[in-house]
Image (spheres, rainbow, N blue to C red):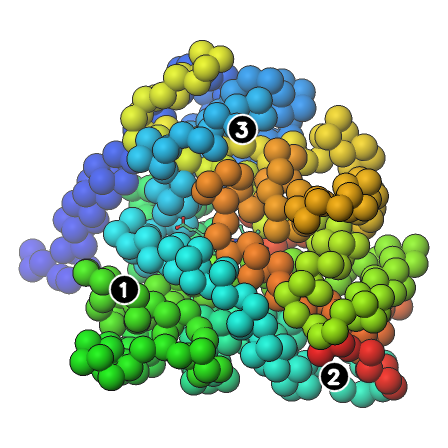
């Protein structure tokens, strides 16, 4: 009988499965080494195969983590099952020690790359280059004061273009409109004025992340040995790769030109508006293998991934939370802005730092709607024994149940209630203190042992100061220039939860109207 192309697939398929099985299970086998040591939570029934337990985790992660933390092992480690390997969930008591273990032993970025399926989403670059981290930590954060006027200017333009400007109530979709605003603010900082209004860059910076999460949410439903077979069938995966290619097409010519001028000594960034951005600082400071225009363009995409949706989710959730609060919170926030504006000569980073009530609201909102229920994720490259005797094997994936910790009634009384000024009330005694640093532990951008959404210790998110600045900027503007409310018969939308991630409904609608007189201080 003649062999047809369809028949030849019968040979190819087992080979593909075999290759996928050997490579895909290597990682999950290493991650499962710990299986016998710690009790497992989340098996729907005894002897449940891994793919069933994985589905239980995918659709019910929050309550499984809560179950493990609350009912069973609050002070001990336990395990949860995912398709890509078991996770060891450590107790809160090990936080301090975990945060001080060197990244050569407990790697935060190997854990991140593992979570976001780096080989399929382009995120594996973070294993080779740490430039995205150092540039935010060493250049962006110390220069927030310099960049603030440009960000405020961008925000004013973005509000005019992306939000309804009518003085009558208009329907709008917070996720869509604020998403465009978050993308523009992030773009102003990371690619600068030359690209920040470019529709291609704005499309990349928003949609790469959307497609990355679609890819991983879907792919994680399957065992790793099927990933490389399933992946090419997912349109979101094609789009992820398309956006990385598009970013390179857009940015590489400019990067190449600036590198060449920089090498000749004819260009270095000055303190002008045009040069005050991450792209120019990177080109000026990068050396070695990273001084490659394609790598730099790819890093820009990763910075968009780190900054756009993280801040968007905070902005949207805070808007929902303060609208739902109905206890005069919105007015209190407006009064705080007006009193800070009245006290200061101009409106700068120090003014944003003085908005303590707003800090408290951002923190409370993040406690109730965090981006992820698990944090302090680490991949152990060697075995490690904690001081209390907890032994983590080489190759283990370890994390803390941060949402369960922050919402533990022993940590936060009445955790189910959104109490916007909760940490403001706690901060008041320290804020009246004369010490310049007093009250700093209550800022949105300050991780503490019970506020862990930015991580904790030396590996904590390097972009948190920028995140805090732009989220506050958006609220200063929206609170002083607009009124907002839910549509009749609707209220605060619930969060969407898949795996350990929390998302916001992109289609939710609200009402907004512009105030007759703006009290915006910038
Ligand atoms: C509300 C907004 C944000 C949240 C909740 C957040 C959260 C986090 C967390 C939990 C980590 C991992 C920390 C750890 O390893 O324990 C992280 C890492 C990081 N974040 Fe953020 N982040 C936010 C905004 C930003 C922004 C705006 C930027 C960029 C300007 C940024 C840049 C980074 C970078 C570069 C890393 C390191 C990634 C790596 O290790 O490869 N983040 N962030």
Q: Residues within 10 Å of mark 2 (few under 14, many from 20)?
A: some
The answer to the question of whether label 3 and label 1 lie on touching residues, with beta carbons closer than 8 A, is no
Q: Nearer the viewer, residue 408 or 438?
A: 438
Q: Which mark is residue 94?
A: none
Residue bearing the label numbered 2: 164
Q: Nearer the viewer, residue 222 or 407?
A: 407
Q: Secondary structure at mark 2?
A: loop
First in sequence: mark 3 vs mark 2: 3
Image quadrant containing the C terminus: bottom right
Q: Mark 3 or mark 2, which is nearer to you?
A: 3
The answer to the question of whether label 1 and label 2 lie on touching residues, with beta carbons closer than 8 A, is no
Query: Residue 23 occupies which quadrant of the picture?
Result: top left
Q: Which residue is pictured at 32% across the width and 53% down the height?
A: 130
Q: Which residue is pictured at 75% across the width and 50% down the height?
A: 360
Q: CA distance from mark 3 to mark 2?
A: 45 Å
Q: Which residue is pictured at 63% across the width and 85% down the height?
A: 157
Residue bearing the label numbered 1: 286
- Residue extending farthest to the front is 434
Residue bearing the label numbered 3: 95
Q: Residues within 10 Å of mark 3 (few under 14, many from 20)?
A: some
Q: On the picture, is 314 further left or further right than 128?
A: right
First in sequence: mark 1 vs mark 2: 2
Image spot of residue 131 (x, y percent): 33, 58
Q: CA distance from mark 1 to mark 2?
A: 42 Å
Q: Secondary structure at mark 1?
A: loop
Query: Residue 125 occupies which quadrant of the picture?
Result: bottom left
């Amino acid at each position: 009988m003649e062999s047809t192309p369809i028949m030849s697939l019968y040979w190819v398929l087992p080979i593909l499965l075999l290759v996928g099985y050997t490579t895909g299970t290597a990682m999950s086998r290493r991650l499962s080494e710990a299986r016998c040591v710690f009790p497992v939570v989340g098996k729907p029934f005894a002897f449940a195969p891994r793919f069933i337990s994985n589905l239980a985790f995918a659709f019910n992660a929050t309550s499984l983590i809560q179950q493990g933390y609350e009912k069973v092992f609050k002070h001990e480690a336990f395990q949860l099952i995912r398709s890509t390997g078991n996770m060891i969930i450590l107790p809160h008591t090990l936080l301090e020690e975990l945060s001080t273990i060197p990244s050569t032993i407990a790697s935060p970025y190997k854990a991140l790359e593992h979570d976001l399926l780096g080989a399929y989403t382009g995120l594996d670059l973070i294993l080779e280059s740490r430039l995205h981290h150092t540039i935010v930590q060493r250049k962006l954060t110390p220069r927030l004061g310099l960049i603030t006027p440009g960000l405020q200017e961008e925000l004013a333009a973005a509000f005019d273009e992306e939000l309804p400007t009518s003085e009558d109530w208009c329907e709008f979709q917070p996720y869509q409109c604020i998403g465009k605003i978050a993308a523009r603010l992030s773009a102003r900082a990371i690619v600068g004025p030359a690209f920040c209004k470019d529709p291609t860059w704005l499309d990349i910076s928003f949609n790469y992340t959307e497609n990355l999460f679609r890819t991983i949410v879907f792919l994680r439903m399957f065992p790793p040995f099927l990933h490389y077979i399933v992946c090419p069938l997912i349109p979101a995966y094609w789009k992820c790769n398309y956006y990385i290619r598009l970013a390179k097409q857009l940015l590489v010519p400019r990067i190449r030109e600036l590198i060449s001028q920089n090498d000749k000594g004819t260009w270095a960034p000055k303190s002008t508006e045009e040069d005050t951005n991450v792209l120019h600082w990177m080109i000026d400071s990068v050396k070695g293998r990273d001084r490659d225009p394609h790598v730099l363009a790819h890093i820009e995409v990763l910075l968009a991934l780190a900054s756009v949706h993280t801040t968007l989710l905070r902005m949207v959730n805070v808007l929902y939370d303060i609208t739902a609060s109905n206890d005069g919170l919105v007015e209190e926030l407006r009064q705080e802005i007006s009193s800070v504006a009245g006290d200061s000569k101009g409106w700068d980073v120090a003014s944003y730092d003085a908005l303590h009530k707003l800090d408290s609201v951002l923190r409370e909102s993040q406690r109730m709607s965090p981006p992820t229920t698990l944090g302090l994720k680490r991949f152990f490259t060697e075995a490690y024994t904690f001081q209390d005797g907890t032994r983590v094997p080489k190759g283990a994936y370890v994390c803390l149940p941060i949402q369960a910790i922050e919402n533990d009634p022993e940590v936060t009384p009445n955790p189910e209630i959104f109490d916007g000024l909760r940490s403001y009330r706690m901060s008041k005694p320290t804020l009246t203190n004369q010490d310049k640093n007093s009250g700093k532990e209550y800022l949105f951008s300050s991780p503490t042992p019970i506020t862990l959404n930015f991580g904790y210790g030396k590996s904590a998110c390097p972009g948190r100061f920028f995140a805090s600045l732009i989220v506050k900027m958006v609220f200063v503007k929206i609170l002083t220039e607009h009124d907002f409310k839910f549509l009749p018969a609707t209220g605060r939308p619930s969060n969407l939860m898949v795996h350990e991630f929390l998302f916001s409904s992109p289609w939710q609608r609200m009402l907004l109207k512009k105030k007759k007189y703006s009290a915006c201080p910038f």
